[in-house]
Image (cartoon, rainbow, N blue to C red):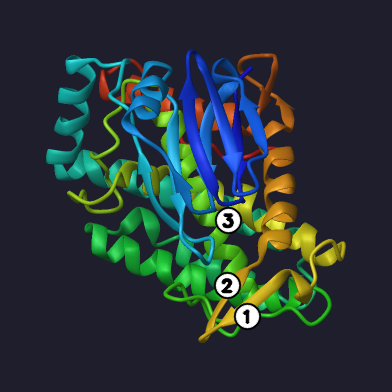
Amino acid sequence: MSRDFYIFSNGRLKRKDNTIYFIDCLENKRTLPVEQINCIHLFGEIDLNSKLINYLSQYGIMLSFYNYYGYYSGTYYPRKKNVSGFTVVNQANHYNDYEKRLYIAKSFVDSAVHHILKNMRRHKEGIEDLIERIQAERKNIEKVQRIDELMGIEGRIRKSYYKSFNKILKSDFGIEKRKKRPPTDPVNAMISFGNSLMYTTVLSEIYKTQLDPTISFLHEPSVKRFSLGLDISEIFKPLVVDTIIFSLVNNRVITFDDFDIDEGICYLNEKGRKKFISEYERKLGTTIKHRKLKRKVSYRMFIRLECYKLIKHFIGDEEYKPLKAWW
């Protein structure tokens, strides 16, 4: 079974014969088993060449790059092998038909809100008023006629949700408001870092299907990003990323020593990233008994299944119903 590899040190990635090596700046050599790699995440300063890229492409391995602060910079996305013109044409048709696009966009937001409320109800003491506010906003999702109205509702819901973090999180961790560019406190730093990981995970699962990652429904398609990854991430961010933050903080696994602040930018240092990624990988590998498939399915596979459901919807096999965790 393939898995993600994370490289924090500086060094170089190289191919020699049919083997991939990572050689750090002290000339320590580590072998990476190419047939077991799903995606390589590069946090250090890494040298690589086209010979390596060509080899990774044969196996459909993506490379995700992160900047000095650990924030996502971009992904090398190999040429897709799973292609279907029929699926892509129908995916585009669902974007061009505004009613169809709106249906899918609403589905993404409603699923995200379902998971947001699920998180809040587990820690409902002192945040009952915020839960009620989000429930009231949720009723408006079905009524909206435009994507920008939907985004407005989603923004107000997240504003209330992030306020609840100050009650959910124990110790001195807290958040005044969501700040992405750049994060200025530890909670915002964890949200940004976790959301970046989720985006790359969703992208790697999209890659294994016939979906076109540039045709999205909630976020506007752009020439500079794979916006379908942003869409599907909305479903899983509260389900995976936020629960990890609650667990790391409330179980005192992560502390203020796991963060650095540089020129007003707060970020997880290497020790903190390793703690977060360890919990993230554990969460993605956790399995749940699927009610329809009658077998255990990992969180990572739930992401892939969401892609398959979208394909069925696009080609007219089955109406898309987004994941709403029942566990």
Q: Quadrant of residue 204?
A: top left
Earlier-in-chain disc, 3 versus 2: 2
In the picture, measured across the screen, residue 175 lies left or right of residue 47, that is: right
- Of residues 285 and 34, the one nearer the viewer is 34
Earlier-in-chain disc, 1 versus 3: 1
Q: Quadrant of residue 126?
A: bottom right
- Seen from this angle, which residue lies furthest front? 27
Which amino acid, by three-letter code, is at mark 2?
Answer: Asn
CA distance separating discs 2 and 1: 7 Å
In the picture, measured across the screen, residue 230 lies left or right of residue 297, that is: left
User: In the rendered image, which residue does mark 3 sit on?
Assistant: 194
Earlier-in-chain disc, 2 versus 1: 1
- Label drawn at residue 188: 2
- Residue sitting at x 30%, y 42%: 103
| Image x and y of residue 165, in percent | 67, 73
In the picture, measured across the screen, residue 292 lies left or right of residue 214, that is: right
Which amino acid, by three-letter code, is at mark 3?
Answer: Gly
- Label drawn at residue 254: none
| Image x and y of residue 154, in percent | 42, 64
- Seen from this angle, which residue lies furthest right? 251
Relative to residue 253, is residue 36 depicted above or below?
Answer: above
